[in-house]
Image: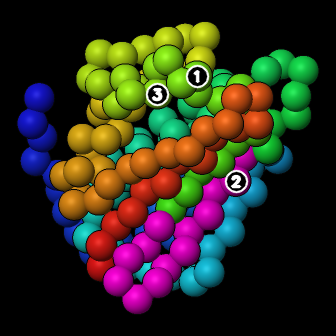
Amino acid sequence: EAFKPNIKRCDLVEVTKIAIEIFDENHIVFRSNVNQVYHKLDRTQWIRVMTNLIQNALQAIPENKTPDIRVVIEESKFITTISIGDNGSGISSEIKDQIFEPKFTTKTAGMGLGLGIVKNIISSHNGRITYTSTQNMGTIFTITLKK
């Protein structure tokens, strides 16, 4: 489904913090190299993206491990990157090409919230999302937004 984002100039740092506050933030470390960075965003959709990625990160962590989620914003001259890292089980190489497909889900890997939707929202903001993952070490999703 195509949606029309409601785009306004927003402070990415502030909106990302709002998304993090929804969770038990003992396990989530937030860092940013700037106090504010403005992008044209659909605020509601952005919060949805961040909560989905944080939820997935938390679900990817085995029960015998203390969650360690890191959300990092880094502004540079032409882009801002937002990364969400976890210390979970990682994404197996068998499924790595499928995780952004619209209907793909595997509850065992904690990817139940629809990364296809996340990717669509980020694309509608002229951004992109990539990830790196190491089995039993964790996964880092990185969103890149042009300025």
| Secondary structure at numbered mark 3 | loop
- Classify the position of the C terminus by image quarter: bottom left
- Check disc 2 and give the amino acid type: Arg
Q: In screen coordinates, is 135 left or right of 142?
A: right
Q: Is residue 94 above or below residue 46?
A: above
Q: Is residue 77 magenta?
A: yes
Q: Is residue 97 above or below residue 33?
A: above
The answer to whether the residue labelled 1 contacts the one labelled 2, judged by CB atoms less than 8 Å apart, is no
Which residue is painted at 79% across and 44% down in the image?
A: 68
**Residue 124 placement (x, y as % from top left):** 19, 52
* Residue that mark 2 sits on: 70
Evaluate whether residue 3 shows in this view. Answer: yes
Question: Badge 1 is on which residue?
Answer: 92
Part of the protein shown in magenta? 69-81
73, above or below 143, in the image: below
The image's mark for residue 18 is none
Q: Secondary structure at mark 2?
A: strand
- Residue 96 got which mark? 3
Do the residues under discs 3 and 1 have CB atoms within 8 angstroms?
yes
Please say whether residue 61 is one of the residues in the magenta stretch.
no
Q: Earlier in the sequence, mark 2 or mark 3?
A: 2
For label 2, the crowd category at 10 Å Cα-Cα, with few meaning under 14, some 14 to 19 and many 20 or more, is some
Nearest the eye: 9 or 61: 61
**Cα distance in 3D space between marks 3 and 1:** 6 Å
Closest to the camera, between mark 1 and mark 2, is: 1
Q: On the picture, is 53 further left or further right than 25?
A: left
Task: Measure how far apart labels 1 and 2 are at the Cα level.
Answer: 21 Å
Instruction: Residue 1: give x, y in percent of width and height.
Output: 11, 29
Whether residue 14 is visible to the viewer of this picture, yes or no, is no
Q: Residue at x 68, y 69 (%)?
A: 31
- Could you tell me the amino acid type at mark 1? Ser
Compared across the picture, whether 130 is left or right of 138 comes to left
